[in-house]
Image: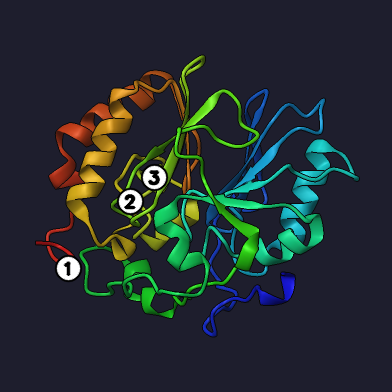
Amino acid sequence: MEKEMSYGSDYKPIPATSMASGVGIEVLPDLYCHTVQIVNINLVGNPETNDFVLVDAGMPGSVNEIITATEARFGSTSRPKAIILTHGHFDHVGAVIELVKHWNVPVYAHELEMPFLTGKMSYPDPDPTVEGGLVAKISPLFPNEPINLGNKVETLPTNGKVPHMPKFRWIHTPGHTPGHVSFFRESDRALIAGDAFVNVKQESLYKVFTQEQEISGPPRYLTPDWEAAKNSVIELESLKPIVAVTGHGLPMTGELLSQSLEELVRDFDSIALPDYGKYVN
């Protein structure tokens, strides 16, 4: 029931933004990426129909922006068939409760994310000591308590299919979180990577603001399992995606994407893995 849904007691808007905030990009005819402050949401589906989904749910306090972007893309009476989550960090579920109430749609996530989405367990604390920039230092200020979506959240099918995304399959890409997933479509090699890797160095406040494009590993201050994170990047690179949208940073395509992913796999320990931090072995 809706009355069971709640955010953690530390839920609050975060005054961080980027130059790309409010900008939407049609990456493919049926893949639209919109930046909410410092994080991306994705609308997957042809705008000539009303058959689409929302992937991830933005920052705290962003409900009106997400609804406005959705209606601009699909029409004033539109609503997605579902909200699909790559994972449950605050910047990917920031408006999910308001959106569920507004649209009356289900939410799907990997079964290993369920404790963090049903009020049972908090993620490991952010690491302000990890090698990186100012964003890492202020990460303890970010909301980290679990939200509770009650019976509105369902597990993704075990067969790899994604509800209402018929040509995509979900891929378990843990490391950043235990149940993190990415989505891949073989027909055009389109990848929605979430935070398995990102297209901006998320620890650097300057690069977050300017959205300077470079492939990096998952955000360091919120990644507790680096061995799993590396294996997830290796698996995604092996798919040889042609276009990739990530949770942070501008979409990347073509040769730049392939070369950058190959470099990330080859040099993961120097590019992505921090030299120090409480989650670094």
Q: Which residue is mark 1?
A: 277
- At 20% from the left and 34% from the top, the residue drawn is 265
**Measured Cα–Cα span from mark 2 to mark 1:** 14 Å
Residue 174 is situated, as x and y percent measured from the top left of the image, at 31, 49
Mark 1 or mark 3, which has the lower sequence index?
3
Seen in the picture, residue 164 relative to 141 is either above or below; the reply is above
Q: Secondary structure at mark 1?
A: loop
Mark yes or no: residue 95 visible: no
Amino acid carrying mark 3 in the image: Val
Left or right: 7 as drawn, with respect to 174: right
Amino acid carrying mark 1 in the image: Gly
Q: Are marks 3 and 2 in contact (CB under 8 Å)?
A: yes
- Which picture quadrant has residue 136? bottom left
Residue 239 is situated, as x and y percent measured from the top left of the image, at 34, 23
Seen in the picture, residue 47 relative to 275 is either above or below; the reply is above
- Which picture quadrant has residue 44? top right
Residue 103 is situated, as x and y percent measured from the top left of the image, at 79, 54
Seen in the picture, residue 161 relative to 229 is either above or below; the reply is above
**Measured Cα–Cα span from mark 3 to mark 2:** 6 Å
Q: Which residue is mark 3?
A: 198
Q: Secondary structure at mark 3?
A: loop
Between residues 155 and 139, which one lies in front from this camera angle?
A: 155
- At 15% from the left and 37% from the top, the residue drawn is 267
Between residues 157 and 271, which one lies in front from this camera angle?
A: 157
Q: Which mark is residue 218?
A: 2
